[in-house]
Structure formats: structure tokens, C-alpha cells
Amino acid sequence: MANRRGPGQRAGLTNAAVLGAARAILVERGLAELTMRAVADALGVAPNALYSHVASKRALVDALHDDVLAEVTEPATAEPKAGVREVMISSYEVLLRHADLLPIYLARQGSRGPNAQRLGVIMDALLSLAGLSPDSVGEARRALIVYTIGYATFSGSQVPLGPNDGAPMPPDVVRRDFERGLDWLLTGITGS
Amino acid sequence: MANRRGPGQRAGLTNAAVLGAARAILVERGLAELTMRAVADALGVAPNALYSHVASKRALVDALHDDVLAEVTEPATAEPKAGVREVMISSYEVLLRHADLLPIYLARQGSRGPNAQRLGVIMDALLSLAGLSPDSVGEARRALIVYTIGYATFSGSQVPLGPNDGAPMPPDVVRRDFERGLDWLLTGITGS
DNA sequence: ACCTGAACACCGTTCAAGT
DNA sequence: ACCTGAACACCGTTCAAGT
């Protein structure tokens, strides 16, 4: 029931429709099955029709990356250390829900998209309030983001790390360990 | 000059030869060009001949991962904090030389291979010497490894992180920032 | 056991049409 | 401008041979 359109007929595609279909496939079937052909199929169009709305698969995945960050909630606290802690934990939780996307995400360093910018500004304000110098603010932001994305990536695939392996770690333990390391890092950064 | 062998003739392949050819392609041409067909071509055999020595492409890449860690040098210091610092910096440098491999590496969490085991044991001994409880040792090891692999992954692809972007960061600045964050983390862990 | 030839079931992307 | 049909240049992997 897909191909009753001739060469001239429009399917009414938009950039948003393509992204939406891609997002649905990612969530329901995982990154490995996110192919241009699968997206096209879900939309009932020929594979190459997508290229009228999206430059490439890479551009599509980039857009998906920033979309994910829209779910990160802003901190309720104004207290710097607690505020940063909140943002990182919210980020961790959101990223973990899209673990498939993370390896590429880290390698490309998290989309200079609008949502990434928004969170960066919030973090910088809090770190500055904590008394860090302008230089240190950037360094601390990068350390925190790398740690958080890294831990989410690592947690997303349940494989132990280091010796005394064998048993996969329960999710709540992983989550607790993430917070422990985050606190170590925050203590080192804020000096308290 | 590749196909002068009939169906019966052996090419003298070994598992080590396949890994070696794969490693060479990875270093010289990058991950994107590391295909089973390219490896076979470099060895002068048909693509499917590899499957007599390697179970799958995934198994091949796993083996490559652990190979990389063989280059990490053991710490010269017995002092715990400085020793851990040395191991992480050596790991960072080695990983950075194989940045292409890192995204997959983090997602699978760094090969339970022999080299990964060796480094894990060294780290645990040092962290224990630093006065950490058995539980904390594992948590600290994971935090340090995630941070280090994460930073190397991130550094390997020169894209800025957060606001005030645009200019790519010079390698020595990235390196200094990595050490700064590492020290924050170590300070938080050891409490000094 | 180790290799080849041929094939299967895919990919992302481009190009020349049609409306 | 937006879509289709057909094709290009690839993938990883399997299967049935041959020695």
C-alpha cells in the first residue's frame, strides 16, 4: 500500500516528519535499524525522497542528537553545586534513555544545537556563581559533560569494567556509582 | 596479482595475520575504511576467507580494542595518587592515538581482554593503598576510566563543547584541560 | 581445515526523468 | 520543488563446492 504515487505526485513530506519517523525507529528498533530506507519505508516513500528534506544520514542523526537534549530539565536550585548536580543527573537520565545514540554523540561532541547551547549557558552561570574563574568555568563544564555522557554511554551497554567481572551490575548500582563519581568531581571542582 | 589460487590452495592465513592487516588499515585509513573486504584485499584473499580465522567483524574489532591497551605503560611511582594519575595519562595518550576506535570502545566498555584486566588490577592496588574501601575502589576505578576514555573520545574529534564555540581548541589546551579535570576527580576521590 | 566463486540481503547516495 | 525508478558502488555473511 505504499507505491500508488507516480513520479510527479507529492507525498507532503517535511523535515519534521522525516525527523519524527527517524526518532520513532530509533526508540522502537534501535540505532542498527535506523536506516534511510527504513525511514522512507515508514513514511511510504522511496528512499531517495528523503534527500529533498535532509542533507544526509549524518545530518539527520545530528538533528536527532539535539532533540534528545530538549528533555533535560533545568535546575530548580540556585545554589551552584546543587544546581550543576541536578543538571548533570537530569542529563544522565535523558541520555540513558537513548543509549544507542551516545557513542556517535560523544565522538561528535554533543551537537552545537540549540538545546546543547541552552544547557551550556546554564552550567556556566552556575559554575561562575560557585566562584570559578572564566577559564576554569569552561574546563569544569567540559569535564562534567564528558564524565556524564561517558558514564551514560558506558551504562547503556551493560558490560562490567575492570577485574572481578562476570556478573552484570544492576541499574540502581550503576546509577549510584555515577552519582558518587559526579560528587567526587564536583568536590574537586568547587573545593568543598 | 591477487587471484592465482584455486579453491583448494591455502594462503597461509592466521588469526594474527588478519588482526595485523586490520590494525594497519585502521591506523592508515581510519575506521570507516576498515571493512572485511579491505582486510581481505590487503591479504590477497577472498573476503569470506577471513571467516576461517575470525568469527565476525565484531570479534575482530574487539580484539583490536584490547591490542591498543598493550601500549599503556605501568606507573613508575608507588605513591597512589601519582601512580593512578600516571596510568590515566598514559591511557589517555594511547587511546588518543586510536581515536577512531573509541566510540565503539566506550559503548562496549573496553574489552574484558587481558590488557584491560592487567591495568584494572594495577589501578585497584593503588586506590586501595590510597585508603579507599573495597566498594569505593571499584567506583573510583570506573569513574576514572569513564572520564579518561570519554575525554579521549571527545578530544579525538575536534569539535568544541558548549557555548562560545567556533574556534577548534588546540591539542595542547585540550590535553591541559584533561589533566585539570583528572586532578579534580583525583582530589575528590582521595580527599586531598 | 582452509580457501574460492557465487550469491543473498542489505546499505547510502546520485542521476535522469516526470509533474 | 518534490517525488519515482533505476542504478552505482558498496557492505557483512553464508553456502556449496574444491583440495
Image (cartoon, coloured by chain):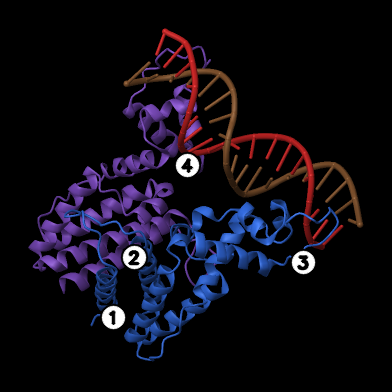
Chain colours: A blue, B purple, C brown, D red
Q: What residue did someone put label 3 on? A: A12
Q: Is residue B116 left or right of residue A116?
A: left
> Of marks 3 and 2, which one's residue comes earlier in the chain?
3
What kind of residue is marked 4? Gly
Q: Return the x and y of residue A60 as percentages of the image width and height.
A: 61, 60
Q: CA distance from mark 2 to mark 1?
A: 21 Å
Quick one: label 2, few (<14), some, or many (20+) residues within 10 Å? many
Determine contact: label 2, label 1, CB under 8 Å.
no
Both marks 3 and 2 on one chain: yes
User: What's the mark number on residue B30?
Assistant: 4
Q: CA distance from mark 1 to mark 3?
A: 53 Å
Q: Please tell me whether residue B69 is drawn above or below residue A163 in the rendered image.
A: above
* Label 4 vs label 3, nearer the camera: 3
What kind of residue is marked 3? Gly
Q: What residue did someone put label 2 on? A: A151
Quick one: label 1, few (<14), some, or many (20+) residues within 10 Å? some
Both marks 2 and 1 on one chain: yes
Q: Return the x and y of residue A39 as percentages of the image width and height.
A: 63, 58
Chain holding disc 4: B
Both marks 1 and 3 on one chain: yes
**Nearer to the camera, A147 or A2:** A2
Q: What residue did someone put label 1 on? A: A190
Q: Is residue D1 left or right of residue A161?
A: right
